[in-house]
């Protein structure tokens, strides 16, 4: 073992206090049974209540009315943190409204009394926790406290809070540089764009007090921040904590979210569309990273690539709040989808049944705990933003449930029928190959559907990608389900079919649908040439395809096709897509179209290196009459897409050429990802409700 490994192990042991059984339990939960909270049936209300109780304990642990900054595994509670105590005040007041409990009003009042005692003579508030500093001013912390004092004055009309906020705002304006930047009294002495989360409260307070001085100051800082945005990617430079972060153009998601939220709120207050667009551009890129990875890395670079293996849980829920806010402005439900997934990741990491009251219900800085952001500790701001995100989620889901769909317009005219097959028919037979993958049933589905006009492909190319190693599969199952559940599956009595693999579900069956045959069996039965490869991208596969010299290829359940594969067929590669392009690209688009109010349908298009961005041959809308579930919706669209693709293939085989196509532009459509379960539930209810309403209308007409 190297010196570095030994040093790291010693640090892990010391910082986590591994000699304490409760800490060992917490660290084990970072490794095994990551879905314990889901499996235990904890609802959002359970998670909210647990976090609220933790935040209450964080305040009660202090004797000065402030909220303790963090709970450390090694040393326990630290000391009151003025900055976060300030912006916890609006959270306590929101909880008063949510639970109709005046205790939260009293807690907010205690926070205010604590802060009023700390305000410096010049109007600023000190940085850091009180055990570190009560005399040095902090620009960022002062602004966060203004937000709390303003919220308290709104709720109580306490003149002392308003006077303190005015003094603080005046001080902020006095330390701002002429170019709009905030350079004085900053963390580590660096100007940073995440200080937009300071100037946004100056903007809010300017609107609240009708003070043009504050509004102009916030506008100047917004201009300075926007000058540091990369116009290509939306990245805000100087958004990290340190000079090294700035040089490397990277930041933790906590400060990325600070920058985006600050720009967004200031722009809303000042009615600045340029700022709203800037915030939206960056927020969409972070959402895309989460959707693609299934995880939000705690550190991202200027191209939104992962620069850490841990997650910053605070950043997750801050981004969720941003996505909810942007949804309110633009009705882009994709952002709600990302927000729900980000919250789920935090819910999975929340210790719900821990024996230590300083841990139970709190939200760690990093996931796993030993990540570099607030290592081995649970900061109060993680719990605050988590609570805010759950409260915002309740409102957004209620709105989505109650409101009628917004509807989506198709931005370009696409053909809805193929041209007449007139003119000279091709005398040379077209060579057609199908690309599929193990587990897909598209080949038998297509060939059965197209048998009426005598279609027979020249070959089917089947990808049989190697399964992960047994060790990796076992590790993944233990990580998700826990060791106990895994062992029970191993030693439980199983049927003969289950015993073909360890635990039954560690391997994937080649046939996953009742009554459907896999491609290999079907080709063997029908005498279709089958070529089996590990991947279409391997040299062997590419060589086999070139020897076939196909005129046309059809995507029949294979994976993503790259340029070398796409370049082989003379006419190109066709795909049937379960949405009307270009409006609906990506995954679950039938569901997304129905959720948004349509139009629901399918498209046949050529595949290019993008995601559903190739030229369009034809699109067709699907009638939703009588459809009362997502399963029925998908089945209807699937039937129509197979039929439409068959028409396009028949046209090509008859005439030796593809029908005319309509080009897509990248900016004309949106990419969608897997729909979150909460949104699927809303869609299921709306589909069922719509059918019931239709049935009621029919009965009413018959009676009349």
Image (cartoon, rainbow, N blue to C red):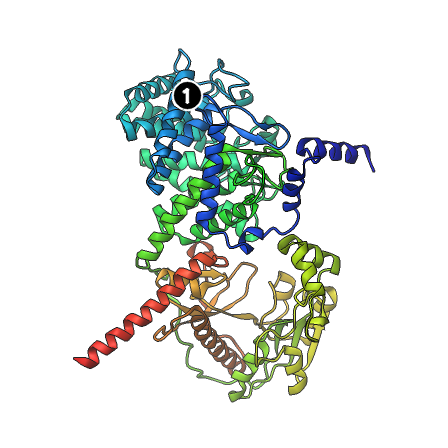
Indicate the position of residue 55 as horizontal and vertical percent values.
47, 34
* Nearest the eye: 537 or 76: 76
User: Residue at coordinates 54% horizontally, 18% vertically from top-left?
Assistant: 131
- Location of residue 26 by image quarter: top right
Q: Is residue 365 above or below residue 459?
A: above
Q: Is residue 454 left or right of residue 487?
A: left
Instruction: Give the SS element for disc 1.
Output: helix
Determine the residue positioned at 64% across, 39% down. 22
Q: Quadrant of residue 475?
A: bottom right
Question: Is any part of residue 196 visible from this angle?
Answer: yes
Compared across the picture, whether 581 is left or right of 269 comes to: right
Residue located beneath label 1 in the image: 114
Residue at 71 percent across and 60 percent down: it is 468
- Closer-to-camera residue (391/229): 391
Which quadrant would the C terminus be assigned to in this image?
bottom left
- At 52% from the left and 83% from the top, the residue drawn is 449
Residue 208, position in %: x, y? 28, 28
| Residue lying at the far left of the rendered structure | 704
- Residue 229 visible to the viewer: no
Q: Please indicate whether residue 9 sits to the left or right of residue 105 in the image.
A: right
Task: Report which quarter residue 1 is drawn in.
Answer: top right
Residue at the outermost top position: 121
* Dot 1 alpha-carbon crowd within 10 angstroms: few under 14, some 14 to 19, many 20 or more: many
Q: Nearer the viewer, residue 513 or 43?
A: 43
Question: Is 132 in front, or is 622?
Answer: 132
């Amino acid at each position: 073992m190297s010196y570095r490994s030994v040093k790291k192990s010693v640090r892990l042991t010391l910082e986590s206090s591994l000699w304490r059984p409760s800490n060992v339990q917490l660290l084990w939960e970072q490794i095994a049974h990551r879905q314990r909270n889901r499996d235990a049936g904890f609802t959002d209300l359970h998670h909210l209540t647990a976090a609220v109780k933790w935040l209450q304990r964080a305040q009660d642990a202090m004797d000065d009315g402030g909220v303790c900054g963090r709970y450390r595994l090694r040393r326990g509670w630290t000391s009151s943190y003025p900055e976060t105590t300030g912006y916890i005040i609006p959270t306590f007041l929101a909880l008063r409204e949510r639970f109709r409990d005046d205790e939260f009003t009293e807690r907010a009042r205690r926070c205010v009394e604590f802060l009023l005692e700390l305000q410096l003579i010049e109007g600023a508030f000190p940085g850091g926790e009180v055990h570190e500093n009560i005399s040095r001013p902090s620009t960022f912390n002062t602004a966060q406290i203004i937000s709390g004092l303003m919220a308290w004055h709104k709720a109580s009309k306490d003149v002392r809070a308003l006077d303190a906020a005015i003094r603080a705002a005046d001080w902020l304006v006095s330390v701002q540089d002429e170019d709009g930047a905030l350079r004085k009294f900053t963390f580590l002495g660096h100007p940073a764009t995440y200080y937009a989360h300071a100037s946004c409260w100056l903007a809010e307070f300017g609107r609240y007090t009708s003070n043009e001085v504050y509004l102009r100051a916030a506008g100047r800082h917004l201009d300075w921040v926007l000058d540091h945005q990369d116009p290509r990617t939306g990245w805000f430079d100087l958004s990290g904590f340190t000079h090294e972060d700035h040089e490397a153009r990277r930041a933790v998601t906590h400060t990325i979210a600070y920058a985006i939220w600050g720009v967004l709120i200031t722009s809303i207050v000042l009615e600045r569309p340029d700022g709203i667009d800037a915030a939206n551009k960056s927020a969409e890129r972070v959402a895309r990273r989460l959707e693609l990875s299934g995880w939000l890395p705690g550190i991202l670079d200027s191209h939104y690539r992962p620069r850490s293996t841990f997650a910053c849980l605070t950043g997750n829920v801050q981004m969720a709040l941003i996505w909810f806010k942007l949804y309110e402005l633009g009705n882009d439900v994709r952002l709600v989808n990302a927000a729900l997934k980000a919250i789920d990741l935090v819910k999975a990491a929340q210790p719900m049944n821990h024996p230590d009251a300083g841990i139970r219900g709190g939200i760690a800085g990093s996931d796993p705990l030993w990540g570099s952001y607030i290592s081995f500790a649970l900061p109060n701001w993680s719990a605050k933003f988590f609570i805010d995100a759950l409260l915002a989620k309740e409102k957004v889901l209620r709105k989505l449930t109650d409101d009628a769909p917004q509807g989506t317009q198709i931005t370009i005219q696409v053909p809805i029928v193929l041209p007449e097959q007139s003119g000279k028919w091709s005398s040379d037979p077209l060579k057609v190959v199908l690309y599929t993958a193990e587990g897909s049933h598209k080949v038998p589905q297509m060939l059965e559907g197209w048998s009426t006009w005598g279609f027979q492909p020249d070959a089917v190319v089947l990808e049989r990608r190697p399964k992960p190693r047994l060790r990796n599969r076992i590790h993944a199952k233990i990580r998700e389900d826990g060791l106990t559940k895994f062992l029970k599956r191993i030693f439980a009595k199983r049927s003969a079919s289950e015993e073909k693999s360890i635990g039954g579900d560690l391997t994937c069956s080649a046939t996953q649908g009742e009554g459907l045959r896999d491609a290999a069996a079907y080709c063997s039965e029908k005498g279709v040439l089958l070529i089996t490869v590990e991947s279409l991208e391997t040299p062997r596969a590419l060589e086999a395809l070139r020897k076939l010299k196909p005129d046309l290829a059809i995507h029949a359940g294979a994976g993503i096709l790259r340029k070398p594969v796409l370049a082989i067929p003379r006419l190109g590669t066709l795909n049937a897509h379960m949405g009307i392009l270009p409006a609906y690209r990506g995954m679950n688009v039938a569901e997304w179209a129905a959720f948004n109010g349509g139009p629901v349908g399918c498209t046949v298009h050529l595949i290019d290196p993008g995601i559903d961005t190739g030229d369009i041959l034809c699109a067709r809308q699907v009638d939703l009459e009588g459809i009362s579930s997502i399963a029925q919706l998908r089945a209807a669209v699937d039937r129509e897409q197979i039929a439409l693709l068959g028409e396009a293939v028949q046209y090509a085989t008859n005439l030796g050429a593809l029908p005319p196509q309509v080009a897509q532009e990248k900016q004309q459509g949106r990419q969608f990802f897997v729909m979150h379960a909460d949104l699927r539930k809303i869609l299921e209810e709306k589909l069922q409700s719509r059918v019931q309403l239709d049935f009621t209308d029919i009965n009413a007409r018959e009676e009349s």
